[in-house]
Image (tube, helix red, strand yellow):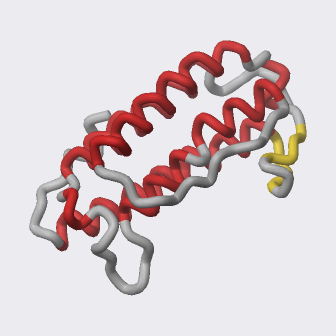
Amino acid sequence: MSDTAAVTAEALLEHWQGHRRLTRRLIEAYPEDQLFTYSIGGMRTFGELVLELLTMAAPMARGVVTGDWTTSWDREQKPKEEILRMWDQSTEELNTLWPRIPAERFQEELVAFGQYPGRASDLILYVIDNEIHHRGQGYVYLRSLGVEPPPFYER
């Protein structure tokens, strides 16, 4: 098997940030009074899902770069404006940390957050996949609330 990357680190970050831009627009579209109260079928609220995403993205990049897997698992309800501020801060941290990941680090086996073993690239892809999954839940919630979500293809 070839060691040639199918995608560059820069392209992967841009792909991820495209998803993050779309998720941010979904948060913006979400009615604030429903952010931590509305759910369907026993699923968590969209606010809870977004707080989970915030505990994963920048902390994953930080862990890959530094080996420091500590993170704040603050899941307290917050106003939408504060969540958006935290989202933007996480995005900037991700942009700052990403260039510090050496190319070979993506292939290293790690244990993220002291409990999730895997190759760094696979752990990063999991975080991206998790965001897409939770954003999909947010789309269902918005539609059921009668709110037109942003087009999924406009990242």
- The N terminus - image quarter: top right
In the displayed structure image, the side of residue 95 where residue 144 appears, left or right: left
Res 140 quadrant in image? bottom left
Q: Position of residue 61 (x, y in %)?
A: 67, 32
Residue drawn at (12%, 60%) of the image? 147
Residue in view at x 63 percent, y 43 percent? 125
- Please name the residue shown 78% across and 41% down the image: 69
Q: Position of residue 135 (x, y in %)?
A: 38, 55
Q: Picture quarter containing residue 65?
A: top right
Q: Position of residue 29 (x, y in %)?
A: 19, 49
Vertical placement of 26 versus 75: above or below?
A: above
In-image side of 122 versus 18 (left or right) = right
Task: Spot the residue most to the bottom.
Answer: 41
The image shows a total of numbered marks equal to 0
Residue 153 vertical placement versus 35 (above, below): above
Q: Taking 130 as reference, is 68 above or below it? A: above
Residue 141 vertical position relative to residue 84 in the rendered view, above or below: below
Left or right, residue 70 beside residue 95: right
Residue 152 locus on image (x, y percent): 28, 46
Of residue 90 and residue 116, the one placed in the foreground of this image is 90
Residue at 62%, 53% (x, y): give it. 73
Residue toward you, 50 or 117: 50
- Toward the viewer: 116 or 108? 116
Quarter placement of the C terminus: top left
Residue 48's image quarter? bottom left
Horizontal side of 35 relative to 100 (left or right) equals left
